[in-house]
Amino acid sequence: MLKIIFNYLIFPGFLFSAFLGLMTSWLDRKITARIQWRKGPVWYQNFVDILKLFYKEIIIPTQAKLSFTLSPFLGLGAVTIVATILGRLLISPNESFLGDLIVVIYLLAIPAIAFILGASSCGNPLASVGASREIKMLLGYELPFILSILVVIIKAHSIKFNEIINQQMVSGSYIFSFSGAIAFLVAFLCAQAKLGFVPFDVSEAEQEIMGGVLIEYSGLLLAIFKLMRAILFYIMPILLIVLFMGKDLTLGFLILKYLLLVILVTLFKNTNPRLRIEQVLKFFWGYLSSLGIIAIILALLGL
């Protein structure tokens, strides 16, 4: 019992993933600042921002339902479990369990559901617009995301993370195959959408709907949502590395791969304009889903 508590609350669970998530978000802000010829924040700025929100007043809308308060905790719990699963996998691959990949796929959908539940229950029309967009986003990117993961399952003949890694140790990282490279591209763009980053930030869109799904959140509840997104930013590159670049996961190579993916996410975010919601759906259901199907066919052919 003590080991489980330690794993989920300290290392590699909540505290560890929260620290790395906030540091990853700082790196994102620092790179963004350099792109814009600014100096950027100090390394501890995100920690200060979160602590400041902890002491702010929590304002609950008069029309809000219980789900408004519970949604941030639901999302934070889901990403913490994913962070623990992936962290334990990297520390001790033999602790992988049957179907852990499927469990992670389901858990990664919960942050978006938490946004939808919270925004839908607050009674603000702009939040309802954000929730509607978040629903469309979720329906849009989940299909190509699952298609990209099916490529990995086909190549590894397994839904266990450790067997996926072991297969790459023998045959090489999947990203260096035709089907794997296409699947990685699809998964990378879907990860950008899961993170709510430009060009897929339509559910918040401050210039249009003033924060959308987060417009009514303040204080501790807003801090939890921001912390949830920071942890999600930490675990998505790890997931992509495990699935597509799993040949060498020694600490040095793992850090290099992780930093490379974070830089790519940040550069992509800062070099593309926001899409409209119909453009997002066309992009995911049309272009990315087609690429995902092509990748599956190539994987079945052994390419």
Image: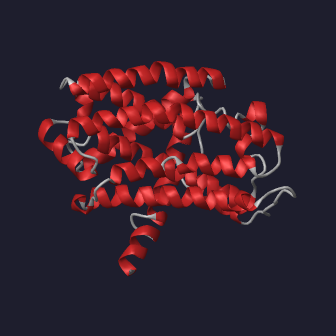
What colouring style does the render use? secondary structure
| Residue 261 picture location, percent across and down | 40, 37
- Residue 213 or residue 19, whichever sits in front: 213
188 or 257: nearer the eye?
A: 188
Q: Position of residue 291 (x, y in %)?
A: 39, 21
Q: Is residue 297 left or right of residue 285?
A: left
Quarter containing the N terminus: bottom left
Q: Is residue 294 visible?
A: yes
Q: 243 or 249, which lies in front?
A: 243
| Quarter that holds the C terminus | top left
Q: Nearer the viewer, residue 255 or 189?
A: 189
Looking at the image, the residue that sits furthest to the left is 170
- x, y percent for residue 134: 64, 38
Quarter of the image for residue 146 reads: top left
Q: Residue furthest right?
A: 62
Q: State whether residue 42 appears in this view.
A: no
Query: Would residue 3 be found to the left or right of residue 93 on screen?
Result: right
Residue 230: horizontal and vertical position, in percent? 54, 50
Looking at the image, which residue is at 62% across and 33% down?
Answer: 136
